[in-house]
Amino acid sequence: MNLKRFFKPLTIMLVTGTIFIFSSINAFGHWYQYGYNLYSFTYSPDSGSDYWAGQAAKNWRDKAGTTITKSTYSNNTVSLANYNYSWYGLYTPYTNSSGGVYKFSIKANTYALQDDYTNWDKALISTLTHEFGHAQYLNDLESGWGNLSIMSYERNRETILTPQAHDINDLNNYRN
């Protein structure tokens, strides 16, 4: 038996399979199934979040071209409050019977942000920008991404305030 003839197809199969598995995991890991819209949506801020939510919306508009606008008539809400929890932000989708998201709420925990960050106002903008990313189908990146993504848990919330190249690439891939 010729070993070269045996190992060549086996090697090709292993390399191809490995590439397929890792590319599938990567694509799946960045997609959030309960997003709201990839291109445009409105939100209604509470009185305390108006400025901060506006900055987060502007970050997406300037970097990705997503039209996120304030509307007092929107069912999508953004609010700031002191919650006795350790999370900084929370995106909550509301789904219909077919699983589609018909509205969402975003909450920012000013208590945790002020407790953990010197520049909590910047961390707040980073948090709201991150939560608006969920509304655009972007998933959390829990480890290994550092400051390369607004969706990364590891980002520096006092310096990474806008979507990064990785976020824009993911968003554009989903749009196509």
Image: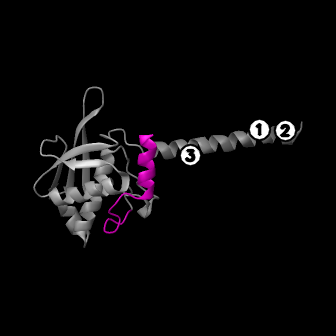
- The furthest residue to the top: 97
- Residue 13: x percent and y percent? 70, 39
Q: Which is nearer the eye, 171 or 113?
A: 171
- Residue at 30% over, 30% down: 99
Task: Give the CA distance from mark 1 to mark 2.
Answer: 7 Å
Q: Position of residue 136 (x, y in %)?
A: 33, 45
Under mark 1, the amino acid is: Pro
Name the residue carrying label 1. 9
Q: Is residue 159 magenta?
A: yes
Which quadrant of the figure contains the C terminus?
top left
Q: Which residues are magenta?
A: 155-176
Residue at (25, 71) in percent of width and height: 119
Identity of the residue drawn at 29% across and 32% down: 100
Please, what secondary structure does the residue beneath circle 3 have? helix
Residue 136 lies left or right of residue 86; in this view the side is right
Residue 25 horizontal/vertical position (percent): 51, 44
Circles 1 and 2: CB atoms closer than 8 Å: yes
- Mark 2 is surrounded, within 10 Å at the Cα level, by few (under 14), some (14 to 19) or many (20 or more) other residues, namely few
- Asked if residue 84 lies in the magenta stretch, the reply is no
* Residue assigned mark 2: 5
Query: Which quadrant of the figure has residue 53?
Result: bottom left
